[in-house]
Amino acid sequence: MAEKKKTESTTKSDENIIYVGKKPAMSYVLAVMTQFTAGAREVQIKARGKSISRAVDVAEIIKNKFLSDVKVKNIEIGTEERVMNGGNKVNVSTLSILLSKA
Amino acid sequence: MAEKKKTESTTKSDENIIYVGKKPAMSYVLAVMTQFTAGAREVQIKARGKSISRAVDVAEIIKNKFLSDVKVKNIEIGTEERVMNGGNKVNVSTLSILLSKA
């Protein structure tokens, strides 16, 4: 499954992608739950850099505490090049977890 | 501090597991490279909690910069219960990345 999207702004809403950032994990758990409650069969959780560990927390909390019929269908890692304020380019790791409702 | 393997199925021996902690990513990159150079066909990279993002960095650096014939064969996430100093139990997310030489 090829990843097409690099930035959040181009994401279509019907693709059910939750971007995990620096807020508490529960914020994103709630966002994912809302997608599933609204009828989504699959929700993609994405994160970059240090937020990657939080994305794993989000997936585990949903699976173990809230929606036991949701399974991890696929996990992908990758690298993105980001241009910093000073103009330097740095590589940032990315993680994408696809959750699927049984 | 014993490492419990809950989700593993394919690894033959503990020799091919690298546990990623708080050292710089390059320390672990070197450790993984050493395993492959010593003849390993597969190396498992494991991490817990905040070190998870570093484990992804390690896998990406090896794949993209050092060993282009190494691919990500499998990625698993999980949860471990840890007892803290005060006796409290907390859940910690885990990540396991299986790298395989083509």
Image (cartoon, coloured by chain):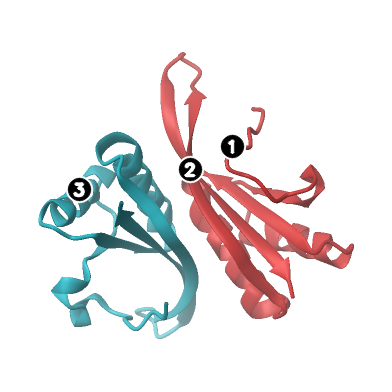
Chain colours: A cyan, B red
Q: Is residue B40 above or below residue B14?
A: below
Estimate the x, y position of residue A45 in percent, counting from the top left: 32, 60
Neighbourhood count class around disc 3 (C-alpha, 10 Å): few under 14, some 14–19, many 20 upward? few
Report whether mark 1 lies on the same chain as mark 3. no
Residue plotted at (62% across, 65% down): B73
Estimate the x, y position of residue A16 in percent, counting from the top left: 21, 66
Residue plotted at (71% across, 66% down): B100
| Image disc number at residue B6 | 1
How far separated are the C-alphas under marks 1 and 2? Answer: 8 Å
Identify the residue position indicated by label 2 in the image: B78
Judging depth in this view, the residue of B58 and A89 nearest the camera is B58
The mark nearer the N terminus, 1 or 2, is 1
Judging depth in this view, the residue of A40 and B92 nearest the camera is A40
Residue B74 relative to residue B38: left or right: left
Q: Given the current orientation, which residue lies at the most extreme front position?
A: A102
Secondary-structure class at tag 2: strand
Q: Chain of mark 2?
A: B
User: In what quadrant of the picture does the N terminus of chain A appear?
Assistant: bottom left
Q: Are marks 1 and 3 in contact (CB under 8 Å)?
A: no
Residue B15 relative to residue B28: left or right: right
Q: Chain of mark 1?
A: B
Identify the residue position indicated by label 3 in the image: A27
How far separated are the C-alphas under marks 1 and 3? Answer: 28 Å
Q: Given the current orientation, which residue lies at the most extreme right position?
A: B38
Looking at the picture, which amino acid does disc 2 mark? Gly
Residue B37 relative to residue A32: left or right: right
Estimate the x, y position of residue A28 in percent, counting from the top left: 23, 51
Q: Is residue B68 above or below residue A69?
A: below
Residue plotted at (63% across, 37% down): B5
How far separated are the C-alphas under marks 3 and 2? Answer: 20 Å
Q: Chain of mark 3?
A: A
